[in-house]
Image (tube, helix red, strand yellow):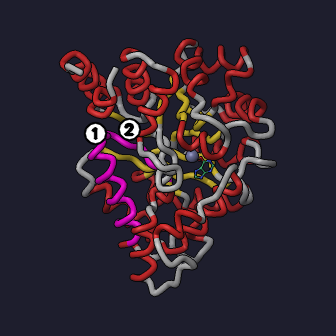
Amino acid sequence: MTDGFVEGMPKAELHLHIEGTLEPELKFDLAARNGLELPYASVEEMRAAYDFDDLPSFLDVYYEGMSVLRTEQDFYDLASAYFRKARSQNVVYAEIFFDPQAHTSRGIPFETVVDGLRRAQADAGFRTQLIMCFLRDMSAESAMETLEQSLPFGDWIVGVGLDSDEKGNPPVKFAEVFARARREGYRLTMHCDVDQENSVAHIRQCLDEIRVERIDHGVNVLEDAALVEEVRRRGLGLTVCPISNSYVTNGFKEREVKAMLDANLRATINSDDPAYFPGYVNENLVAVQRAAALSRDEMTTLVRNAFTISWLDEDERGRYLDAVDEYVESATQ
Ligand code: HPA
Ligand code: ZN
C-alpha cells in the first residue's frame, strides 16, 4: 500500500466548506484588493494565530477570515483556487458547502456569493455541485429566510446542510426548515460534529426527525449499536474528516474509520476546512491509511463510498465507479 496508489485514484470530495479553503496568501490578496487592513503582518503571523483546539475556537477564526470576501470576483477566486488544488489531487467530483448567512449577515447579497461560485464551477474543469449550509447558531427563522432566498437559484444548489456551533443547537431546531427544503427538492445532510455534547442524541434526531440522507462527521454513531444498525440498513453515508478531527477533538479517529468499514457503514474521507486544518483530500486519506494501516481494498472502499453516496444520478455514479475500478485494476503501485 503506497501513498501513490491513493494519490493517483480518481476521487470525490463531499465535505468541504469553500470558505474553509481560504488560504492565508489569498486572504492577504483579497484584503489588499478590497482596501482592508488585516491584523497580521505576514502569512506566518496569520497562521500562528490559528490556535484553536475545539469547534467554537475554530469557528471564531473561520468567520473572522471570511471578512475579506466581498465581491463576486472574490468568491470566484476562492472557489477557483480550491478547484485547481482539488484537480491536482485527482478529485474528479466535488460537492462543496457554502455558508450564505456568514455573508448576507455582513451585507453581501446572496446572489454575489452564488454567482461567483457558479462561475468558478463553470471553469473548474471537473464536475461539482453546491450544498447550502444553514448556521445552526443562528435562528430557525433566519435559516427559513435563507432557504427562501435560495429558491430562485434552486437549480444550482443540490442540497442543504447544517453547520457551525452544535452546542445547544440540535437538529430538531431546524425540523421545519429541513421539511420545507425537502419539499422544494433539495437533498438533505447535517453536521453531527465529533465528540459534542449529545452527539448520539443528535445523530438519532437526524435519522428519526429530519430523515437526512447523509451525516457530516457522525463518528459518534459507533457509541450506539442500534444507531449503527440503522445507518447501515438505510445505507447512509458518513463524511469523516480526519485532519479536522485531530484539531478540534483528538486524533485522526482512524480506529473509528476502520470500525465503520468493518461494520459496513459508508464512511468517506474528506478535508472539511483545509486552509485551517492543513491537508487536502489526499493528505487526509494518507493520514488515515497510515494511522490505521488500512489495506488497498479498504482505501478503495473509502473512495468508492464517496461516489456511492454522492448526489449524482445513477449513470454518472456508475461511470465514476467504473473509473475507480479501472484505476485499481491497472495500478502497479
Ligand atoms: N463543523 C461545524 N461548522 C463548520 C465546520 C465543521 O466541520 N466547518 C466549517 N464550519
Ligand atoms: Zn464541516
- From the viewer's perspective, is residue 239 above or below residue 109? above
- In the rendered structure, which segment of residues is drawn in magenta? 74-97
Contact (Cβ within 8 Å) of mark 1 with mark 2 = yes
Mark 1 residue CB less than 8 A from any atom of ligand 2: no
Total numbered labels placed on residues in the image = 2
Residue type at mark 2: give it. Asn
Can you tell which of label 1 and label 2 is closer to the viewer?
2
Q: Which residue is mark 1?
A: 90
Quarter of the image with the N terminus is top left
Residue 330 in sight in this render: yes
Question: Which of disc 2 and disc 1 is earlier in sequence?
Answer: 1
Task: Name the secondary structure under disc 1.
Answer: loop
Quick check: 211 left or right of 30? right
Residue 185 in sight in this render: no
Residue at screen point 65% across, 46% down: 248
Quick check: 96 left or right of 249? left
Mark 2, Cα crowd under 10 Å, few <14 / some 14-19 / many 20+, is many
Residue 13 x/y as whole percent: 41, 39
Mark 1, Cα crowd under 10 Å, few <14 / some 14-19 / many 20+, is some
Q: Residue furthest bottom?
A: 35
Residue 139 x/y as whole percent: 74, 59
Residue 114 forms part of the magenta stretch: no
Residue type at mark 1: give it. Asn
Residue nearest the viewer, comparing 1 with 331: 1
Residue 243 x/y as whole percent: 53, 41
Quarter of the rendering containing residue 126: top left
Quarter of the image with the C terminus is top left
Residue 40 x/y as whole percent: 54, 76
Quick check: 171 left or right of 326? right
Residue nearest the viewer, comparing 312 with 93: 93
Q: Which residue is mark 2?
A: 282
Quarter of the rendering containing residue 265: top right
